[in-house]
Image (tube, coloured by chain):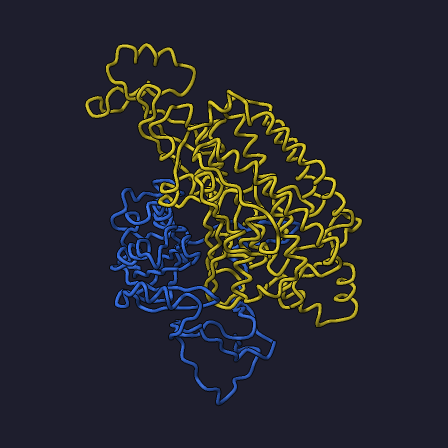
Amino acid sequence: MSTGYDEATEGKVYSVTGADWDEVVTGVRDSEEERLVVNMGPQHPSTHGVLRLVLTLDGETVTEARGVIGYLHTGIEKNMEYRTWTQGTTFVTRMDYLSPIFNETAYCLGVERLLGIEDRVPDRAQAIRVMMMELNRISSHLVAMGTFGMELGATTPFLFGYRDRELIMDLFEYITGLRMNHAYVRPGGVSVDLPAGAVDKVGEFLKEMPKRIKDIRKLLDENPVYLRRTQDVAYLDLTGCMALGITGPILRAAGLPWDLRKSQPYCGYETYEFDVPTERSCDVFGRYLVRMKEMEESLKIIEQALDRLAGPLKGDPVMIEDKKIGWPAQLALGPDGFGNSPDHIAHIMGSSMEALIHHFKLVTEGFRVPAGQAYASIESPKGELGAHVVSDGGTRPYRVHFREPSFCNLQGFPAMAEGGQVADVIAAVASIDPVMGGVDR
Amino acid sequence: MTSPDNLPEVPGVPEVPESPVARRGMFGASDSGDTSGYGGLVVRRAPQLSTPRPYGSYFDEVVDSLGLDDAIERVVVDRGELTLHVKRERLVEVCGKLRDDAALRFELSLGVSGVHYPHLTGEELHAVYHLCSITHNRRIRLEVSCPDADPHIPSTVGVYPGNDWHERETYDFFGIVFDGHPALTRIMMPDDWDGHPQRKDYPLGGIPVEYRGATIPSPDQRRSYQ
């Protein structure tokens, strides 16, 4: 029971912090006031991370819903102003930790536009970026669908989702060295070429994955409990999406085939064949279907990228040739477990003093980026991820701001939840698929 | 930067006006002598851009359709992106026309980003709006500035409801007050936080870390290259 409130203005206030529900129930039983304000989160298994929801309830109906964020704010944008442009990738990769490759790519595209080197990034680097991004899209959607099932009370999709995501995590570890926080995409290309055997491993994954996606769809597509919980729930139509700036699967589930990979292609997406799945139902189930179909489309894109990487682009450089920007990218795994470039080391340590100085300056000081601002946007699994990058001509970003799709989409959750049932709030939030690391940055 | 103890004074070097200088010397380091021989180099700050017509691409068409020339301070086309610097008192009007005019139709607002330029006296704080037209598949950027002494910009929530949280974020980080916003409160930082963290005069903080006898200063104390 709480104290220190004004009963005349606020009515009777009961604060529940532990296992004292009986007290509340007896207290409320004789009350005429039906309005109930419930605080959900920030630590609650079904709020998808540290998100706090303040719900005003009238019986089982939500009359007002508010989201409170900021619990995972890490000051990434501020920190980047004190590191070089290249070091920035290690920060942005940690924002939306379920789609690190997208964060890095958006940021690097922004930096490349400022540098004016967009056309000089090698095709092989772009194809690797595309392949990694699509793998990442699948892993992000798998987590979205897995946690979604769990939040609605079904544990099996969760286990399936995480089991299948593990395949992609293994690929990421094999290619970049890390399961998460890769800092793999760098301004000018990617940090290292695909290791030997990576093409085969991705090929095996492509054979295995369609079956795995089918397994999840078998569990959920026609599951009557799941359909009841998702169909016609958290309705948000195209007008609502536009007004609230909502993009990604939510927008496509409202019927608009808006996908930046098609409409404003980057990284060579215009050369890949794939469809943009849409639904017209504007509800949670539609968003689920869009995500499942997108995974299948992603597999198509990965296959095409893989063919190019194993075929015409084999052996090409993965980092821009400009030595004033590109770090050495011909890395080999050393006996100590770290990646190094033996040839480059032999060159700078043994034969060229100028190369040593140059390498030292490039790594410690970084490259200068001409003053100006740029906005680069890509289609992340959650929607449009934009990077507003400002330079004052120095070796560090002057300001970097991210237009995080989770942040924008989460804003639309009251519009989906108000007027619905309490239980549907969970479905609404889960269908937005917010990742709080991205929301709060 | 040359230090007087390791280089003799060179007679006859022309004086350089102070204000537009971005850096001196080759490498921009100021905490030790520059032995590179480029110590006298002066790099000026990039001048304020203003692009003359024609702007190229679809940009002329957008500016013509908008038609509110008196509301626009200058137009910048840089790196294939169109930026309109809008007078702050006309911002809402410009946004409304950009959204509703059939030839413009910038339906989707991609949020607000703040930038703090302490050296631009009288327009220290900038709010940057990215808009996207799905109908015409176009993008545009609006930039509005306000002085630090009077950090007010009209709110665009009435035109783009999705800017609600973005304006709160910009207020939180830069202290720009968006007049007319329905509930302008902090969003990332705690409600009782002092200061606005993304401003350039707000320190990053941090402590020096010792590792194997060497001390690494905190990030904002490390040598920086301008």
Q: Residue at x 56, y 56 (%)?
A: A266
> Can residue A58 be seen by looking at this rendering?
yes
Q: Is residue A15 left or right of residue B10?
A: left
Front residue of B153/B157: it is: B157
Looking at the rendering, which quadrant does residue A291 occupy?
top right
Say above or below: A150 vs A101.
Answer: above
Left or right of A54, for residue A402: right
Residue B97 drawn at (x, y percent) = 29, 57
Residue A301 picture location, percent across and down: 63, 47
In the picture shown, does residue B103 fall above or below B38?
above
In the rendering, what colour is chain B? blue
Figure colour of chain A: yellow
Q: Position of residue A350 (x, y in %)?
A: 79, 67
**Rendered residue at 61%/26% (across/down):** A218
Looking at the image, the residue that sits furthest to the left is: A8
Q: Nearer the viewer, residue A199 or A258?
A: A258
- Residue at 48 percent across and 37 percent down: it is A279
Instruction: Note whether residue B201 is visible.
Output: no
